[in-house]
Image (spheres, rainbow, N blue to C red):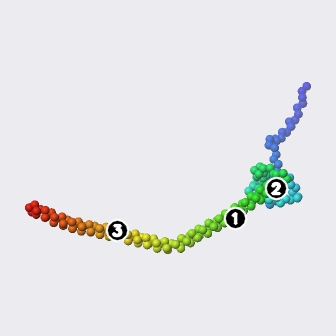
Amino acid sequence: MPLAKSAPSPVTKTSSRPLAPPTTIFTQEETPHIEFYRFFGVNPIDGNEQLDKVYKWTNEKSNSISDVLRKTRTLEGKLGAPKLGETRLTKLFNWIRLSENINSLRESMGDEIGTVTTRSKQEISRIKEGQLPELERLNSQIEEKKRSLSNAIKRYRLNANDQARNIKNRYEKELNELKTMRSAFKGEK
């Protein structure tokens, strides 16, 4: 028996992608995100100073709650498990507090070193400025002494040459006289 043909059913096209849940816009707020409370198992109604501090620190350069949670998880991994009787939140809070104290000490140390460096540079330039006239006077005296020495050497050389010439002339005269005597004794003219 032939089967009856049924009317074609309308085919609706369905997307092969699952629908994504609506995304929430992440804003960097002062109060912790609800997911942050869940991460630590803290009731948002109770409020927690330690949680606020940890959230502010992890939220500083983050773009989304996932960045905040990743940064928190990474820090927890680096610090290791909390001691007996210590919570994860307390361990993070204490580390962040110490880290901020260290950073503030480093900043104040850098400021003091910068101040000392600036003061020393100013003092060195003040000393140099005070010593420049004395240095210029000493340099001019050195140049004068160099010129004086150079002139003395030249005079001595000229004087030595004159004396050597006089000695040579005197000995030549004596030699010529002796040569004349010798030739007279020999009978030569």
Residue corresponding to mark 1: 108
Q: Secondary structure at mark 2?
A: helix
State the residue at coordinates (84%, 51%). Answer: 84
Q: Select label 1 or label 3 by which is in front.
A: 3
Report which quarter residue 170 is drawn in: bottom left
Instruction: Please name whichever residue, 60 or 19, is drawn nearer the observer in this view of the structure.
Output: 60
Quick check: 133 above or below 34?
below
Q: CA distance from mark 1 to mark 3?
A: 63 Å
Instruction: Name the amino acid, label 3.
Output: Ile
Q: Position of residue 37 (x, y in %)?
A: 84, 54
Q: Earlier in the sequence, mark 2 or mark 1?
A: 2
Q: Position of residue 14 (x, y in %)?
A: 82, 41
Quarter of the picture containing the N terminus is top right
Instruction: Name the amino acid, label 1.
Output: Ser
Q: Secondary structure at mark 1?
A: helix
Task: Please rate how many residues cluster around mark 3, counting C-alpha atoms within 10 Å: few if below 14, some from 14 to 19, many from 20.
Answer: few
Q: Secondary structure at mark 3?
A: helix
In the image: residue 100, left or right of residue 129: right
Quarter of the picture containing the C terminus is bottom left
In the image: residue 165, left or right of residue 82: left
Residue corresponding to mark 3: 153
Residue corresponding to mark 2: 90
Q: Position of residue 186 (x, y in %)?
A: 10, 60
Quick check: 78 above or below 174?
above
